[in-house]
Image: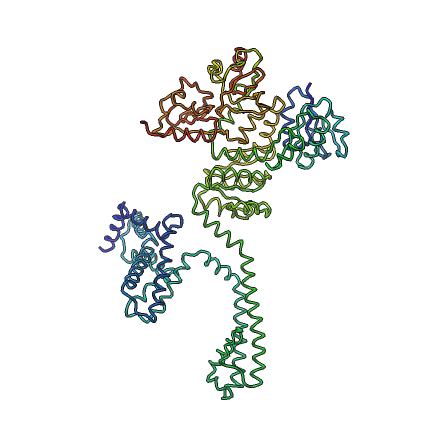
Amino acid sequence: MRKMVIFGYSKTGREIAKLLEDEDIDLTIIDENPMLVSDANEDGFFGRYSSFKDDKLLSEVGIGKDVEVLFCVSDIDSMNLFITLSARNMDSNIKILTKIVRKEDEKKMILAGANRTISPHEVGAIKAYRIIQKPKVSRVLDQLSRLKNKISITEIEIPKGSSLDGVYLNEAKIVKESNLIFLGILDKELGEKFIFFSKGINHKLDGGDILVAIGNRRDIRTFEKQI
Amino acid sequence: MLARLLISFAYFLESSKEYKRVKTFVYNLLENPKSKMKPYFDAFIIALVIITVSILIYDVDHHIPYHMVVVEDFAISVFIFEWVGRFWVSANLRLRIIKYHEDLLEKNKKEKLSEILKIIINQKIAYIFSPMSIIDLLAILPTYRPLRVLRIFLIFRMFKIFRYTKSINSFFKVLKDKKLEFNFLVLLGGFAVFMSATIMFVFEGGGENKNIHSFLDTIYWAIITITTVGYGDITPVTLAGKIITVFLVGGGFLILVLATSIVTNALSEKINVVRESKVLSQISKMDDLIVILGFGKMGQVLASELRHGYKKFMVLDINEENLSKAKELDYIYIKADVSNYETIKSIVFKNDVRKVVLTTDNDALNLSILLTIKAEKKDIVVIARANSYENIKKFYIAKADHVIFPYQTVAEVAVEYIGSSVKFDAIDNILVQKSSITLDEIDIEEENRYIGKTIEESGMDDFNVTVIAVLKESDKENIIFNPNHKTYKIDLNDSIVLIGDEKNIFKIKSDMIRPIT
């Protein structure tokens, strides 16, 4: 069972917890506000309280040992920063996703040890903007999230020695003939960065690269078998 | 008989397209605050006023050359045209007469000439005696030779300028609010002037002072003294006169200080009102305006995106701190209580607002504004932010067109992070637009080169874009995901949703409307 921790039972924290509820995940919620901790327990999650004067609770819930992912999503910015910093200090491999309010805070959080940042205000604003400016795009996105079972975004890792290993993307026949939309690739040779195919660079595919594609489940499975 | 003639003439005008076209043109030129021509025409009139007044000044001790007379005559003809034009468009008489006639037909009565004349007089005479019309007339009439005495009234042309400058009007409006204080001041000043003039006249008017010949002289002296101007052409010679002068100067100083403070006070109190009325007149000229209610963090990000996309929008909030940000970024904003019906009415209902975005973090407030808007104007698209999951449904019940629950969306993205970071980055990039790669839509309109071609034939693939879906006009519910590049033929009114570099998408948009060579 994978272990994950949510710091901060804020509105964002609550939604993340709800989404993770049905997955096979050992989830702990920690907060420095006793009211929110009791809210979490009422909602059926395992919530624990600490004032975080020391790192006792963090190590008790397993940070530094077996916790894979930490979500720092409390409403208090300085606490998010503090917990991110403490957790990174205890475990250099843990994945930390931290909530930010303003874009300018992103650098600060990354410096504190967060792997990625996320901002509800920004996501909400972009969504509103898209409804205004690109109504059809927002309809397609809505459909995509609603039709979760039929169509989904997925990652496909190219196995070593498979038919795609060492082939240039534009020449790969299976890629062209599949029913999937390929968005981009994570090329291990070029580092940990995600590259959109729309950048217009012809990539050489290697074993271990990860493709990101949109399509329905069946087509994805067929494609995986083919390679 | 004459009545019949007038009525049929009204119907004739109503049926004439040409007449309406010309009238609309004149209306746009002179009165329509939204028209593009009006500012130029206004500037032209102001220039004419300044030129003709300059000629008047020059005329005092020079003989005016011929070309100046031509300019003067030209200006007068323009002013006459302007006044006649305004008079013409001030009311639609023909519609009134037609309505009158229709009423008569219903009641089966005969038309009366006197009734029709009454309509005409009521409408048009009212215009002639409106203050603005009088100013215009005063600018024209003195040119008529027998009325040459009235030359000095030519200076009234300067008042025409007021007509075109809103800020001066609002300045006077502000001072009007301080009427009580000004009245008090004038009364006080008048009293002081009259008192000291009388005392002065009593002591020095009997020949003691050779400069004082009448009571009018002492009034003149008192005014010059109380305003601290002090020309010195009339000075007190007796001891009593000197004492009263000291008091008058002291009192005058106080009155001046008082007057200054009243004006500054009134201005600082009303500066927001003045600014607001300026903003209101600014937005009344805009079309397809987007209103953002609540300028918190979400509102701020949205505003910067809209600015980036060259959309016209304005911001409403009551929080001073939020507004200072709007001011800093040079957005159009008004400080107002968004929960107030009057606010919504004067900003959303009275202008050409098509979309409203509610971004406050208070669901009750968002809902109440939503209902206010939907109760009165159903076609305004409202995008509402919900702040708790339980309330999303309520927003839909209240007929919100779109509901955004940012916490859920952000949680969905966050959860993707459990997998490898690849998918998260892909989704995050798409949702938050961090790179130049963007999701966009292309509408296929008439005379598009791509119509009838497959996606492969269209050459879109050469621009390195990834087609995600096609939306058909005929079938609103159905979205074709991942259309087959070889067989799907692009149709008129399709919308293509794709991912690609901003620049490439722009190139496609210009490529597809290029004429077939």
**A143 relative to B95, above or below:** above
Could you say which quadrant of the image residue A95 lies in?
Answer: top right
Q: How is the image coloured?
A: rainbow
B149 left or right, relative to A174: left
| Along the line of sight, the residue nearer the viewer: A180 or B83 | A180
Q: Residue A56 location, x and y as percent? A: 77, 29
Q: Position of residue A79 (x, y in %)?
A: 69, 35
Looking at this view, name the residue that lies furthest to the bottom: B207
Work out whether residue B245 can be spotted: yes
Seen in the image, is B104 located left or right of residue B401?
A: left
The one of B258 and A11 positioned closer to us in this rendering: B258
* Closest to the observer, A25 or A112: A112
* Residue in the picture at 42% in, 23% down: B462
In x, y percent, where is residue B129? 36, 62
**Rendered-image quadrant of the C terminus of chain B:** top left
Residue shown at 55%/11% (left/top)? A162
In percent of width and height, residue B211 lies at 48, 84
Does the image show residue B103? no
